[in-house]
Amino acid sequence: MYDFRMSTPVVESVLTEQRSFPPAPAFAATARVRPDDLAVLHAEAAADPQAFWAGLARAEIAWRKPFTEVLDESRAPNYRWFADGELNVSWNCLDVHLADRGDKTAIVFEGEPGDVRTLSYRELHAEVCRFANALKARGVERGDRVVIYMPMVPEAVVAMQACARIGAIHSVVFGGFSAISLKERIEDAGARCLVTADGGRRGGQVIELKAAADKALAEGCASIDTVFVLRRTGEPVNMRQDRDVWWHDAVAVQGAHCDPEWVDAEHPLFLLYTSGSTGRPKGIQHSSAGYLLGAKLSSRWVFDLRDDDVFFCTADVGWVTGHSYVAYGPLAAGATIVMYEGAPTYPDGGRFWQLCVRHGVTIFYTAPTAIRALMKLGEEIPARYDLSKLRLLGSVGEPINPEAWMWYHRVIGRERCPIVDTWWQTETGAIMISPLPGVTATKPGSCTRPLPGIFADIVDDEGHSVNTPDAGGYLVIRKPWPSMLRTIWGDNARYLSTYWDKFRHRYYVAGDSAHRDQDGYFWIMGRIDDVLNVAGHRLGTMEIESALVAHPRIAEAAVVGRQHEIKGESVFAYVVCRGARPVGEEAAALTKELRDWVTEQLGAIAKPEDIRYADNLPKTRSGKIMRRLLRAVARGEPITQDISTLENPAIIDQLRG
Ligand code: WT7
């Protein structure tokens, strides 16, 4: 059993947080969801959840063929929503706006060097159609997998929407992942097409995506027959005649019309790989209609989107946030979005605020790690910018510590803007627990309450609801919801064991621990499994350990998370070498080598911050590594666990270093 007393929240003061911020009357008066609306939504959802979702699905989605069945539970927990309906997601994000909003700006893009490009809904529609035709011309069909490995440029969204248009299933791989990670994902998905770019720009550097893609393809990926290459940096790249096609050449010969492929509601829209505690990354599979409904509704409810808003979600399309709140949700809602290619601190820590001023951003959504990093640079920087257009701020990815929350509120929101702390996951597809900005009084560090139709609960090890204020438990969702994941690509058994087996298929188990206060507000405490949350992104300890032991000098490795001022958690690795334990300069050199090695294997995000060398690792007599002990040592906490079962107690002093 997971011992909730042992879990150390990232922020200990959450337990004593008493501040509360009701919505400003001016905001509440014109909000899309007001207190009475919310009460009605909650009441309808509680009375008949299926009727609630069916009504919204009919109102929000343009169906080619209406559905007659709402929820198919016959193969639960492989739930199916609106299954006999037919639609096209790209149609719902683009074509539906052409009559009323054709000339409205859909995307404002700014590259790291400062180049700006805008695309109206009509222009975006044309680009999507052209690229969809280019995909078809290379034989890509409904159901084929297309991997997208791109910088944060409009063409990334164009490629995603083009896949949706023709019924191909995209799988975006974050441009910061290494060639080896890319290869693994391409092979797991069995993709036939890769969409990439010569490179992208980040932090003043060129990220050579095509070179990484070449490396991935040279080592396997036999299923790939076409690689589209966008010219972004202009740096030279190798093009393989029979396989590689320049994006601009491919679209130049295509027309700006492409009939959408009508698909079943349950047709997979995309796969997105995410880390688990064991084994390889999981291809989280999302549906078309249910996903679209969740992304669209939550965009409107939580971000209060209206026609004159400019919405800047800073997430890369390589993460789920960039799917739901860049590529799909806001477009389905007809909003104007800002996309930024580069680093938040390039050329200095004012870049986000400069972007907000330059493009008139009204709604800004980012991660606590970015807030903490910018906070550290001092409040003089944001003070130089006129942020008076901002009216709503959002946070996602990990618990936001009250100090960062208050800074965000005071220095960025100028005490005017509500903050929505949104809890959700790659698997949930859309925001699940969040304040509604015109209704909910917020508390720094709490994601507050579930959205209407989301039956979140906290349960103990037996599955009983925990109702004692502040007592921790497993965060679960009691009823299926439309934007939920459908399965893990190619591994339904893992879908069942990861999310459902724990409570005999009755509840979805999120893998987070949480507690509820006397007002019923949820406070997320962190992950239950051995998964780290580094800079708002999930990393499996197993993956990093496997990468480390793949190095010829390493015999054994154990990775744990340690609190990090900016990243939330950082990677702390304990390693046992083959041969003698290195010390002094030899250890320093090996540390550098191992950090580069992990970067090469997995990507810079997984690079260990600390590496400690030991003669062996603390194990129980049955041979299990005592991770909780290692975590306590890494964090410099007192060791409270029973070490009497330790095979080799003397090791503890060495681990302490
Ligand atoms: C995990 C999901 C959802 C998009 C970004 C990450 C943590 C996410 C919050 C929040 C506390 C949060 C959870 C969750 N998390 N948002 N507002 N408060 N924790 O997506 O990589 O699928 O990670 O991120 O631990 O399980 P992801």
Image (spheres, rainbow, N blue to C red):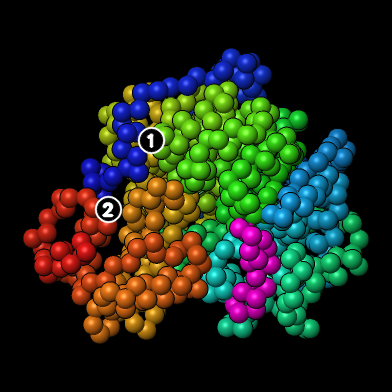
Distance CA(mark 1)–CA(mark 2): 22 Å
Amino acid type, callout 1? Trp
Mark 1 or 2: the one toward you: 2
**Quarter occupied by the C terminus:** bottom left
Q: Which span is picked out in magenta? A: 199-216
Relative to 225, does residue 123 appear above or below in the rendering? Answer: above
Q: Nearer the viewer, residue 278 or 538?
A: 538
Q: x, y percentage for residue 620? A: 16, 66
Relative to 559, does residue 211 appear above or below in the rendering? Answer: below
Residue 424 appears in the picture as rendered:
no
Q: x, y percentage for residue 192? A: 68, 74
Lower position in the chain sequence, tag 1 or tag 2: 1
Mark linked to residue 18: none
- Among the 4 quarters of the image, the one containing residue 613: bottom left
Which residue is located at x 56 percent, y 18 percent?
24
- Among the 4 quarters of the image, the one containing residue 584: bottom left
Residue 379 appears in the picture as rendered:
yes
Left of 491 or right of it: where is 512? left
Q: Dot 1 lies on which element?
A: strand
Which residue is located at x 65 percent, y 76 percent?
211
Q: x, y percentage for residue 366? A: 56, 42
Mark linked to residue 523: 1
Q: x, y percentage for residue 596? A: 46, 72
